[in-house]
Amino acid sequence: MLWEGDTLLQVGARALAILSTLTEAPGRLVPKHELLERAWPDGRVDEANLKVQISTLRRALRGFEGLIRAEASLGYRFLGETAPRNPDRNIPRRRFSMPRLLTQPIGRDNVVADIVRLLKENRLVTVLGPGGIGKTTVALAIAHRLPDTIADETCFVDLNSIERDDQLYGAVARALNFPVGEAPTLEQIQVALQGRSLFLVFDPCEHVTDAVALMVEHVLGFSDQVRILVTSRESLRIGAEFVWHLEPLEVPPPSLIDTAANAARYSAVQLFTRTAAEVSGDFAFDDESAPAIVELCRRLDGIPLAIKTAASMVGTLDIGEICRGLDQRLSLLEPDRQAAKPGQRSLVSTLDSSYDLLPYNERAVLRRLAHFAGAFTLDAAVAVVGDDTMDASVVREAVVALANKSFLIVNHQTRPPEYRLFETVRAYAATSFRAG
Ligand SMILES: Nc1ncnc2c1ncn2[C@@H]1O[C@H](COP(=O)(O)OP(=O)(O)OP(=O)(O)O)[C@@H](O)[C@H]1O
Ligand SMILES: [Mg+2]
């Protein structure tokens, strides 16, 4: 039903705030607490006041009072249609649970713009890549820059705080600020999402892949107004998914003459120098230090977390020492392990969390693959890794699974395809403390 809005409604500011909240997303169940927050932004107020204002509104809407429907004890829903929003009216987008973007991402402007464009056509995009490559950073930049034309609301669902599949709905409900108790059902989530033009970000998902895949399929099935961005080390493998393989930051090619001016054009080098300058007032980026920095960025495969970890050592170590230390594999990981404070993100904790999710066979194969110095084919992996305890098919399956989980870089340009371990993964897998 269309509400012709040329009748002047004689209601006060509170009722008007409630009506505009309800009509922002017709059909959406708006929880009571959200209406209370909008109508009484300055403080706590008894729920009875909300009932009074709803009655006032219904009286004012004479003949159309059925447009405002109460939903059990949860909240209210506006059942009419509203005229299309005037594009000149700048209504701020509602944001739920959105973390701040702490530092400006380096070298990701094009990626962010491309994924935003993709989201116009595809309702599900997965940003895929290994630990520390910058998935969360890119997802946050997208969530902050997403134009209002794509969604009216944005909700960032941080899945770091959950460990098991059955905790997913609770995390989503909390992020949406939706009061449905500790263990909501999928039906309740559906009610919460109904009729909303919403951009949902799930970050990260590799530890609850199956539950996220199920839920995302369901949500995309019942709503055509929800768009979803997932970050993960592993894809969801569902039909609607567009997978975006996030590339590392740009490292200078081997042919580059490593002057400071040349090297400074590459995003990996920019991240190194920015971080080093933050930790050490004495840090100098010049033609003398540039070759070692370029070498470090290449050896670390352009992975931002690894580059930041190495750069933060310049306060205590000479760049040449950090670079030479990469040959003794523990050197980048062990000081990081010791320095990590509780709650602080470290390269080792990132690698631990990926490794801990692997089944026994994949761990064993990964440790053995760490002995490959460069790229290898599947057949070479079988020849080197296989033995009496692990036959060829087990090794093949494990190598493919490790590639799908972003432990290996796959080069599909070669025939047959070649695999390579990220340098940080190799250092980690090769260390004897990873026995299990
Ligand atoms: N483009 C970038 N510019 C500057 N810093 C970056 C960039 N990308 C990532 N970082 C930094 O590198 C670190 C790792 O990034 P991020 O947390 O986004 O990685 P991730 O891929 O989400 O890792 P994980 O798989 O462990 O969740 C963070 O400290 C982040 O601030
Ligand atoms: Mg992340």
Image (cartoon, rainbow, N blue to C red):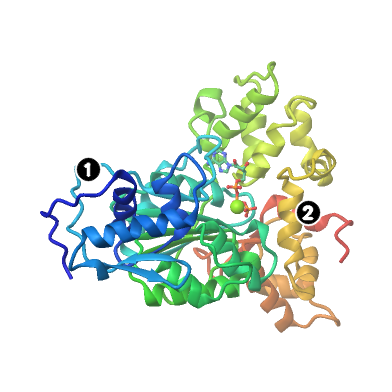
The numbered dot on residue 22 is none
Q: In this view of the protein, can residue 118 be seen by the observer?
A: no
Q: Which residue is mark 2?
A: 428
Q: CA distance from mark 1 to mark 2?
A: 53 Å
The image quarter in which residue 428 lies? bottom right
**Residue drawn at the location 75% of the way across and 73% of the way down:** 359
Question: Could you tell me which secondary element the residue under label 1 belongs to?
Answer: loop
Q: Residue at x 77, y 60 (%)?
A: 370
Image disc number at residue 89: 1
Q: Quadrant of the C terminus?
A: bottom right
**Nearer the observer, 240 or 198:** 198
Crowding near the residue tagged with mark 1, few <14, some 14–19, many ≥20 C-alpha atoms within 10 Å: few
> Residue 277 at x, y = what percent?
64, 23
Q: Nearer the viewer, mark 1 or mark 2?
A: 1
Residue 131 picture location, percent across and down: 64, 54
At 29% from the left and 63% from the top, the residue drawn is: 26
In the image, residue 210 above or below residue 178: below
- Locate the N terminus and report the quarter of the image it occupies: bottom left
Kindly indicate whether the residue at mark 2 contacts the one at mark 1 (C-beta within 8 angstroms): no
- Relative height, residue 90 to residue 211 (above, below): above
Residue 116 left/right relative to 208: left
The residue lying at 67 percent from left, 30 percent from top is: 292
Q: Is residue 303 left or right of residue 123?
A: right
**414 or 207: nearer the eye?**
207
Dot 1 amino acid type: Arg
**Residue flagged by tag 2: what amino acid is it?**
Tyr
Mark 2 Cα-neighbour bin, 10 Å: few <14, some 14–19, many ≥20: many
Label 1 vs 2, first from the N-terminus: 1
Q: In this orientation, which residue lies closer to the viewer: 134 or 148?
A: 148
Residue furthest to the left? 6
Q: Is mark 2 within 8 Å of ligand 1?
A: no
